[in-house]
Every structure is written in C-alpha cells, then in structure tokens.
Amino acid sequence: MRVIQGISVYEDICIGRLFYYGRRNQENQYAPAKDCQRELQRYEQAIMIAWEQLQDVQRQSLKTVGEANAAIFEMQKLLLRDPEFTESAERMISQEKVSAECAVQTTGRYMAKQLEETGDPYIMERAQDVRDITARLLNILEGGGKETNFPDGPFILAAEDLLPSETVQFTKDKVIGFALCGGGVRSHTAILAKSMGIPALFKLGDELREEFDAVLAAIDGFEGVLYLDPDEETLNSMRRKKEEADRRRLLLNDLKGKRNVTGSGRSVKVFANVGTMADVWAARENDAGGIGLLRSELLYLGRREAPSEEDLFVFYRQVLERMEGKEVVIRTFDIGADKQVPYVGTAREENPALGLRAIRLGLRYPELLKTQLRALYRAGRYGCLRIMYPMITSPEEVCQLKTLEEQARQELSHRGETFLEQVPTGIMIETPAAALLAGELAKEVDFFSVGTNDLTQFTLALDRGSGYLEQFADPGHRAVLRLTEMAAKQAHEAGIWIGVCGDLAADTRFTERFLEMGIDEFSVAPGEILRLRQKIRGL
Ligand code: PEP
Ligand code: MG
C-alpha cells in the first residue's frame, strides 16, 4: 500500500480502480509499413470509425451533460479532419513508409507539442484534444474497436491535471473521484469537481504515476489522502468512514424543507452555484432556495463559435422553468483568464486573469454581450431572473453596461419579440476596487454578490490557479473579510441586498462572521447547501 498526501476540495470517501488519463500517448509505436497502400487505407478507416465514435459520445453527452459540454466532441471531430494532421500522417506513411500507428502517434505528439509551446492558454487547451484523438485513433488501429478512451464502469480519474473543459465532460455515474498530481485548489477545475459532489484530491505530486493505472485505490476526502492498493484494514476503515459520511448526509437531508433561521431568529437565503443543467437538478435535489450564481460562460467553452441567442435562450428558459419561480441569478459570461474561447480574437496576454475577461470582453465586443442580454430578457418571462455582472471595477463600467442593456431591449422591440423589460441587476464584488467603491456602485444596482475567490486572488496578489502558493493562501484573510464588510455596510446603507458566492460562503468557519456583517444570501455548490443550513440553524 502507498499513501499519498494531497489537498482535498470535497469531503467524501470513494473506493475504486484508478484510470490514468492520457497514458496512451506514452507508448512507442514505431514500425515500418509492409504495404503503404494498406496502411493508408487503415488510417482512413480509423478516422471514419473515430468520427462515428465521437458522434455517439457527443449524442450521449448532450443528454447527460448538456450542450456546452457536448461541444467538446464537436471540436474533436473537426480536429480529426484537420488538414495539417491528415497531410502529415499520410505523408509519413507514403514517403517515410511507416505504419499507420506510427504516423498517428508521431503526428499527434508533434502537433500537441507545437500547440503547447505557443504559451497561449486557449491553444494549449487544444493540445489536450489532439492527445485525445491520437489516443482514440491508436486504440482503433490496435483493434480496440468501438471502445472510447474511458472505461465503462465507475473509476477514479487520475491525471497530471485537468482543464475545466475536460472536467465538465465527466458524470458522477462514471467518475467517482479525481486524483490529480497538480492543479490549483481554487481553480475552476476544483469548483467543477466540487459541484459534481465527488471527492477530489489535488497536488498529489509526482508520486502519483501512470504505472498505477487500474490499481485499486481509495480517496479519503476528509484527510486529503490517496491510498494506492490499500490493505484490508484501510479498506475497512474507509468503508466505515463512508457509511458514517452517508449517515450524516442522510441526517442533513432531514433539514430539507426547513427554514434557514439562526437561533436569534435571523433568516438568510441559502442558494446554489451552478453551471450546467445537471447542477440545476442537484440544486433542486438539495433544496436550494434559488440559484445565486449561474456561471454562464460554461456554455461558451469548447466551441468554435459563440452560442447563438437561440441556444442561450433555450438554456436560460429551461433553468428558469426548472427553478419554478425561485430566484435565479445568471452571471453574464466570465470568459477569459483560464476560460479562453477561440472566437474572440485576443492576442496572448501575460496575465489573462487581469486581462480582457468578463465584462471587459463584453464592452470590447458589444455584440457578444448584447446577444446574451437579449437571450436573458427573452427568457426572463419564464421565471424569476436576476442578471449579474462579473469583474466590475467602477460605476462608469456599470453605466456603459446599462447602455448596452438599453440597446439590447430596443433590438428586441424592433424585432417584435416579447420579453421582460425590468430585470433586477447586480454586480459581483470581486475586485478590491469594487469593494472600495461599493457606496457609489450600490446606487447603480439592485444587489451585490461577493466573489471571494477572485477577491482573494486580487487582494492578496495570489494567483488562484497556481499550484505553488498553498503555503501563502489564507482563506478568510482579514483583508478580504474587511473588504466584504465594507461592501455589506454600503449595500445596506443604500437599501440593497448582498450575498457571498465565492468558495468562502461554504466555509462554515466564517458563517457567523458573515452573518455579523449582515450578509443576506449565501450561494454555495449544491452539495454544500444542507451542511451550511445546519450551521446557520445552529447559530
Ligand atoms: C469568485 O470569484 O469568487 C466567483 C464566485 O466567481 P468565479 O469563481 O467563477 O471566478
Ligand atoms: Mg470570479
């Protein structure tokens, strides 16, 4: 048995076999071609089979993880027909006289390396897609038939690291835990893992290696420990701990339907953070009072073009209808930083987290934001919608956004659409500037929601995606709490409500402090709702 210490982002236990993501690319496939014509045919056939497989996976994932996540496979289908890939593989077979396997592997490796070396976060993400299709093609050429890259049964996904766009493609029935060598515990990958409600360990280091693929493992998400090939005693102890955790969860379930009132009679809202339709179901499952943050950018990722107004409208309408009249705060896209897309032409930035992201992109490319606003106004008729803007730093930005809102409404009127004209609008307090100017900002909007993840990143000058800063990270740093308190005071003086939707909202060590500040709403991952509710009721 091996014991590897990591950092846990979700408290639960799981036991299962490891699947090491990305191992296929390591094998050396060199072999000369006996018959070049035959190898070219095998290559072409493998492309066709891979395309069919991806078509199936895409169809399947549309049902399970929604359109935003399924779009990743559309991208991979396009890559299969990429002229550069095809030309290189075919040339290697016919001129260098190597086997189809060797041509695919060499071309895949070369292309992935080239993409990685650009240093551009979006292009670097595509390297992962090239690796995926290379592994798929090799699998087919080796006679793996219609097998996909992932095993069927439940498994613990082990990898060096995962991108947000990769993480969203997994469902809970397939992946029961994540074990990553690296990764940032405040990254979007961590947030997505948490919202899936499965144990996830980050920063396990080099000790977690590909050779452990298929080995039985257990994750103790309470202690942040990965057991490889656990002995009987450890397995039994993990099983007992799991039973206990499930029992506690059942007890928490008793809280469903109960009010969120403190001992002193103060009532607060406990809402859910969501990104996909599956999260919306989980929010309902966990009796969320509403949705306090819908990270709308997830629908923009992994696609070649921005989603259309119709795509967005259909999704927002569905979310609002599923929430049956409960409040739904939809944040306009926070594209940029670690969530890059190819269809807004930004050059590579040195510091994308401080770069052209969120509303800055919207103000630079107004059509992109107005399309989203039009979809939101149209969907607003189907539930209780609120719109929220991310990364605000000044009242002037809010005024510019109001102009775009007005234009979007006028465009809908000209088209003769029916839509909701008055949608309460708020902003995220996630830059120190917004907290400092909260008094002025509160006059312009209907609510605030504190994004403690970015607020911490910017206040402490601490890259939330970095895997090297754990020793300096101080959740609930006094400076962040003080900025939150300032914003709360200003919000209440102006008569508007204030929530907290960053990770700190779920950290029950700070619940009392937030209540003392007068925080009116907490928005947390669906799986954290009942635990937080229990804490509030106990205060
Ligand atoms: C935050 O920054 O705290 C937040 C809630 O937004 P995100 O995590 O999506 O950046
Ligand atoms: Mg943020």
Image (cartoon, rainbow, N blue to C red):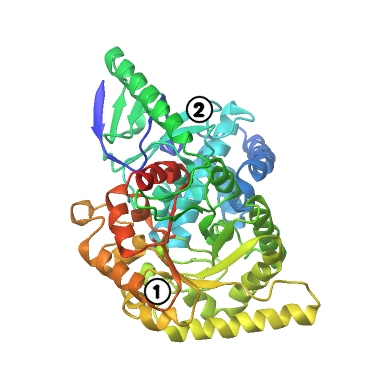
The image position of residue 225, as x and y in percent, is: 27, 32
**Could you tell me the amino acid type at mark 2?**
Pro
Label whose residue precedes the other's in the sequence (1 or 2): 2
Tag 1: amino acid: Ala
Which of these two is toward me, 57 or 375? 375
Q: Which mark is residue 491?
A: 1
Q: Nearer the viewer, residue 473 or 29?
A: 473
Residue beneath disc 2: 154
Q: Is mark 2 within 8 Å of ligand 1?
A: no
Is residue 238 at least partly visible in the picture?
yes
**Cα gap from disc 1 to disc 2, whole angstroms:** 46 Å
Q: Residue at x 52, y 81 (%)?
A: 364
Q: Quadrant of residue 222?
A: top left
User: Image point 29% across, 54% down: which residue?
Assistant: 512
Between residue 369 and residue 491, name the one nearer to us. 491
Q: Is residue 18 left or right of residue 50?
A: left
Provide residue 444's location: percent of width, then percent of height: 48, 82
Vertical comparison of 330 with 212: above or below:
below
